[in-house]
Amino acid sequence: MAMQPAPKSFRLHIGIFGRRNVGKSSLLNAITRQQVSIVSDQAGTTTDPVEKPMELLPLGPVLFIDTAGIDDAGALGDLRVQRTRQVFERTDLGVLVAESGQWGDFEEMILAELSERETPAVVVFNKSDLAEPPAAVTARLAGLKTPWVKTAALTGAGILDFRQALLDTAPEGFVNNPALLGDLVGPGEMAVLVVPIDKEAPKGRLIMPQVQSIRDLLDSDAYCAVVKERELRACLENLKRPPKLVVTDSQAFLKVAADTPRDIPMTSFSILFSRFRGDLPAQVEGTLAIERLKAGDRILVAEHCSHHPIGEDIGRVKLPRWLTQYVGGRLEFDHVQGHDFPGDLSPYKLVIHCGACTANRRAMLSRIMRCRQAGVPITNYGLAIAYSLGILERALEPFPAALDIYRKSREAPCD
């Protein structure tokens, strides 16, 4: 059986930015040793971000994103700029490409954008066979501790230096990846994973959060039992000693909570991913906004993947139904998928995000930051479902800091 490639969400996302026709696509082709992006003397050849997954040792799997130049003008240029700006939100490591003899306000703007997001950056002065980078600029970059290299992408000159700069600048988290749930279980211990098989379960396969959880447990020298919700009670009764953790799909929360003894910690895949991909304490705080919802309020439901919804879809049917029942009145729901995310969040009283299993963590943190800047609370599927079903406190017990936030909110006096 052929080994499956690493999912995009596990890859270091490297965004390549710069003016039109500075050689971004040539640089990508050179580092990947493939003709990934079209190269032309005509400015603006790249119209949409081009993605190229590869193995960049010793980092492992990365995803290069070649963007359109954002010094464009006109209606088409505006669309290119908009799509390129979306890439900032999922970039873990930024590459700013400039022609060796040029540097101006545009490059300063890109550098400032990356700096504001606390995204590490590498500056590449391309076409260095034609001119040297300005000495004042390289001195300033050195003062900012921003690494820079010289390349001539069409000939391959400097590509090894560029590769080393990427390795040296990559965030530490991609060298030492955090655990998804292995730290909650421990070596030699067991987790029970509850996996409903319904219409939305892909035929013959498990969904990504379930697969990633199994792999993380194996990497952590733990082991697991995988059961459907109907078999959970029998599974627990047959174990010689209780598992360290029960993890369920959020839509089976009520049955799993009823069948899991109170002394066994329980949570959901979605809540695990709030910690793994996002910011669990911040999203717990956002969850508390459900208590303030009233009939007529508008809610944004955001999914990072673009699956085709069917039947009893969790984001379009089940979650709106549970929240409507909790609030006791009709709520207005808007839905977005993929990289789409509204620039104006002011119409919303709450944003409910999926677990973001197909996103990288920086993309999810960027969305949380945007919600915070707009003053709009953000939660995720598992947290919102647990709250609306009245079992959030139990679902947070494996996470003491997040549980403390919830309990303090319960103790606070009402307005």
Image: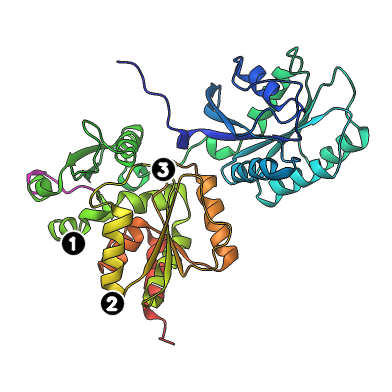
- For the question of whether residue 365 can be seen, the reply is yes
Say which residue label 2 marks. Answer: 328
Residue 222 x, y percent position in the rendering = 28, 37
How many numbered circles are shown? 3
Report, in whole angstroms, how far the alpha carbon at label 1 lies from the one at label 2. Answer: 29 Å
- Secondary structure under the numbered disc 2 in the rendered image: loop
Residue 132 x, y percent position in the rendering = 90, 24
Q: Quadrant of residue 395?
A: bottom left
- Secondary structure under the numbered disc 1 in the rendered image: loop
Q: Which residue is at a point 90% across and 22% down the rendered structure image?
A: 131
Report, in whole angstroms, how far the alpha carbon at label 2 lies from the one at label 3. Answer: 30 Å
Q: Which residue is at a point 63% across and 43% down the rendered structure image?
A: 79
User: Label 3 amino acid?
Assistant: Cys
Q: Which residue is at a point 92% across and 32% down the rendered structure image?
A: 135
Q: Which mark is residue 305?
A: 3
Q: Nearer the viewer, mark 1 or mark 2?
A: 2
